[in-house]
Each structure stands twice: as structure tokens, then as C-alpha cells.
Image: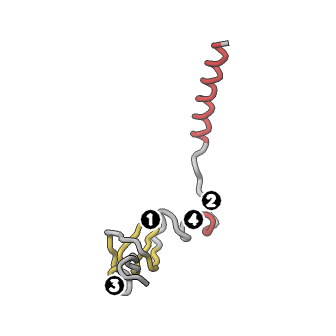
Amino acid sequence: MKKDIHPEYQEVVFQDGSSDFKFITRSTMKPTDTITMEDGKTYPLVKIEVSSASHPFYTGKNMFIDTAGRVEKFRTRYAKKEQNSANKE
């Protein structure tokens, strides 16, 4: 391998913000935060939004998403456009 062209490959902790699940792996990411794990070592910390501990596919739990508000908003906007085109005719 050529020297000085590869990024540093180090141990990093990834922490899921929604479930507080943490795991150590190796990565080339350069986070600014650090965390001390149970083994007493300090590792760089990368905060993530979704992991296998919180993703619905792996947990089997469906997350409720408020689509009714978005659908109603679309319908009112579409109805206004229909009224405007009917008034022009």
C-alpha cells in the first residue's frame, strides 16, 4: 500500500439516539465527540438516528406516522386548484 493516502481506520462507537443502543466497530469517520465505554476506554462517538435496535423492520414494531394531516392538506390544496380552473372556464 502507498503511504499517506489512506484514511485512519480506528475503533468508533455508534450510538442510536432513539434507543440508546451502542456498538463498537471500526470506521474512517472522524467524529468530535467521545464516550467512555464499560471497558474503561474512551472512543470517538458517532450519533445515528436509526439502528437495528430501533428500525421497525428488525424490531417488528410499526411507527405511527401522521399522514392524515398531510392528506387533508393535499386535498384542500387540490380543491383550490380545481375551483380556480372551474372559475376560469
Residue 28, compared with residue 56, is above or below; it is below
Secondary structure under tag 4 reads loop
**Residue for point 57% across, 34% down:** 73
Marks 2 and 1: in contact by CB < 8 Å? Answer: no
Look at mark 3 in the image and give the residue it sits on. Answer: 41
Marks 3 and 2: in contact by CB < 8 Å? Answer: no
Outermost residue toward the front?
Answer: 2
Image coords of residue 86 (percent x, y): 67, 16
Instruction: Give the distance between the C-alpha atoms of the residues marked 2 and 4, in whole angstroms.
Output: 9 Å
Lower position in the chain sequence, tag 1 or tag 2 = 1
Lower position in the chain sequence, tag 1 or tag 4 = 1
**Residue for point 40% across, 71% down:** 29
Marks 3 and 4: in contact by CB < 8 Å? Answer: no
**Residue for point 48% across, 67% down:** 19
Structural crowding at the residue carrying mark 3, measured as other residues with C-alpha within 10 Å and reported as few (<14), some (14–19) or many (≥20): few
Lower position in the chain sequence, tag 4 or tag 3 = 3
Instruction: Give the distance between the C-alpha atoms of the residues marked 2 and 3, in whole angstroms.
Output: 36 Å
Structural crowding at the residue carrying mark 4, measured as other residues with C-alpha within 10 Å and reported as few (<14), some (14–19) or many (≥20): some
Instruction: Give the distance between the C-alpha atoms of the residues marked 1 and 2, in whole angstroms.
Output: 18 Å
Disc 4 residue type?
His
Q: Which mark is residue 55?
A: 4
Q: Work out whether residue 75 or residue 11 is closer to the camera in this orientation and state it.
A: 11
Outermost residue toward the bottom?
Answer: 39
Image coords of residue 41 (percent x, y): 33, 84
Look at mark 1 in the image and give the residue it sits on. Answer: 17
Name the quadrant containing residue 82: top right
Secondary structure under tag 2 reads loop
**Residue for point 68% across, 12% down:** 89
Disc 1 residue type?
Gly
Disc 2 residue type?
Asn
Look at mark 2 in the image and give the residue it sits on. Answer: 62
Lower position in the chain sequence, tag 2 or tag 3 = 3
